[in-house]
Image: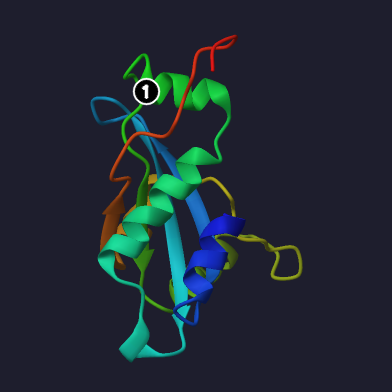
């Protein structure tokens, strides 16, 4: 995620909050990352291609087992980033607190799987991005 932050910094954009979801309902399940972005200069906002590239950058940073599943075994689909509207993660906190979470103890969940939370996040998606290529992977012992 750090390399994505550096890439987004060129566009005066930062990741405000994020969470993830392991989508196993699609053929070739894949990881979905929800991002809320702070774009300080709308005229210089990151393009669709830049956000697609963030998907690949994140995949390149995954461990060898993930990359093997993605490249050699073709068992994992391309990583997906869903950018959500500003205020989405504040709404997520409000939803969690309304269901009994302590406001003093609340942290954005790094992984979600509750249908109600996924529906809320998906209802606020403003753009969807996929990795444009497979990450680099080499079998162990080969260069």
Residue lying furthest left in this view?
27
- Quadrant of the image occupied by residue 96: bottom right
Of 44 and 126, the residue lying toward us: 44
Res. 98 in view: no
Residue lying furthest front in this view?
143
Res. 134 in view: yes
Q: Is residue 67 left or right of residue 1?
A: left
Residue 89 rendering spot, x and y as whole percentages: 50, 69
Residue 5 rendering spot, x and y as whole percentages: 55, 65
Residue 130 rendering spot, x and y as whole percentages: 29, 48
Residue lying furthest top in this view?
141
The vertical placement of 91 against 3, above or below, is below
Q: Residue at x 49, y 76 (%)?
A: 10
Q: Is residue 105 left or right of residue 136?
A: right
Q: Residue at x 49, y 66 (%)?
A: 7
Q: Quadrant of the N terminus?
A: bottom right
The vertical placement of 25 against 116, above or below, is above
**Residue named by callout 1:** 71
Give the class, few, some or many, for how many residues have Cα within 10 Å of label 1's Cα (few <14, many ≥20). Answer: some
Q: Quadrant of the C terminus?
A: top right
Q: Residue at x 62, y 60 (%)?
A: 100
Q: Secondary structure at mark 1?
A: helix
- Quadrant of the image occupied by residue 124: bottom left
């Amino acid at each position: 995620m750090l390399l994505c932050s550096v890439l987004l910094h060129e566009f005066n954009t930062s990741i405000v909050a994020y969470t993830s979801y392991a989508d196993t309902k699609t053929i070739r399940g894949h990881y979905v990352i929800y991002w809320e972005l702070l774009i300080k200069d709308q005229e210089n906002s990151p393009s669709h291609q830049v956000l697609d590239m963030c998907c690949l950058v994140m995949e390149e940073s995954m461990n060898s087992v993930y990359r093997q599943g993605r490249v050699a075994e073709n068992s994992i689909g391309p990583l997906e980033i869903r950018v959500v509207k500003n205020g989405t993660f504040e709404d997520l906190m409000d939803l969690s607190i309304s269901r009994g979470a302590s406001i003093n103890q609340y942290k954005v969940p790094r992984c979600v799987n509750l249908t109600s939370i996924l529906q809320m996040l998906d209802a606020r998606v403003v753009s969807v991005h996929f990795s444009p290529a497979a990450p680099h992977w080499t079998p162990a012992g080969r260069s």
